[in-house]
Amino acid sequence: MSKSRGQLRRTFDTASDLYEAARPAYPDELFDDLVVLAGLVPGSRVLEIGCATGKATRPLLERGFSIVCVEMGAHLAAQARRNLAGLAVEIHVAPFETWEAKPHSFDLVYAATAWHWLDPAVRYSRAHQLLRPAGHLAFWSAGHAFPPDFDPFFTEIQSVYDAIGESRDDEWPPVPPDQIPDQKHEIADSGLFEDVNTRRYLWETTYSAEEYIALLSTFSGHIAMDARKRERLYREIRKRLGRRPVPQVRRHWSAILHVARRRPDLRGL
């Protein structure tokens, strides 16, 4: 697929209606670990990058924290405001890289399945700039996981992706979730953060054909796919799942939580 990171990053706003229902919730354990590893206490100031519809916002709001969100998609931000109405959240529509905010304002800057979309040249320095001394950066992504017992449907459907010219670039099957590389070295190489901690999570969700197609319709690659290819793929998904005794697919998800403490800058801030 030839579309750039910036073009794909903007596709999510077109799926705001599907995003809330189709995307998975993150494990409660992840948020409990985040609170502990980031040293959050009542009154901590928290910034979320790319809140989308609020999937990773509500769990921290429910734990008693107030949150500032910066979301570049106007439709996603509007959906988040509806979903989180009445809670202690403030949502700004802007790209994180250029959003104007007072330096050293937050105790935690975090991103859920959004960090990898940010400009690699500035994301660490920008987070460092916005964090208070000894504040923390945290990020994770929810990705498709392939433990030893993954659903064979995903091997079968690869032939359809191949036939429409949307083959995977990497090996099949992908590495199991406990072998997915973390980003500790990248964080350390930024020179801006230290004391990096990681935690791994694995969970599964069962989908009907229509639920799974709704999920795929929130992914940038499928949104940007040629309509005829997408229709053929979705038709095959319906047909193949319809042949099963129970017409469902079981998809595993994994996430690696990264939490790192801000290094002091040259002026000691």
Image: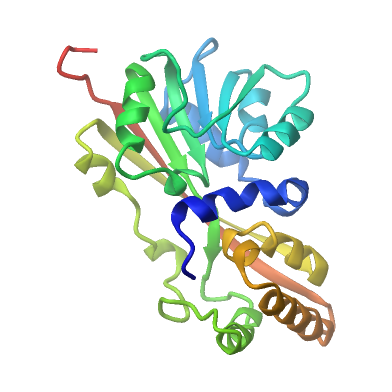
Q: Which is nearer the eye, 33 or 117?
A: 117
Whether residue 146 can be seen here = yes
Residue at 70 percent of width and 60 percent of height? 215
- Judge whether residue 63 can be spotted in this image: no
Rendering coords of residue 216 (x, y %): 67, 64
Where is residue 170, by image quadrant?
Answer: bottom left
Colour scheme shown: rainbow
Closer to the camera, 44 or 85? Answer: 85
Q: Quadrant of residue 258?
A: top left
Q: How many marks?
A: 0
In the drawing, does residue 189 fall left or right of residue 67? Answer: left
Classify residue 188 by image quadrant.
top left
Q: Position of residue 259 (x, y in %)?
A: 38, 36
Q: Which x, y percent locates residue 171?
A: 41, 80
Q: Where does the C terminus fall, quadrant-wise?
A: top left
Residue at the image point whose x is 24% and y is 48% from the top: 185
Question: Which x, y percent locates residue 8?
Answer: 53, 55
Residue situated furthest top in the rendering:
43
Residue 39 against residue 165 in the figure, above or below: above
For the point 45% across and 58% down, the residue is 4
State the residue at coordinates (51%, 81%): 167
Q: Is residue 126 left or right of residue 14?
A: left
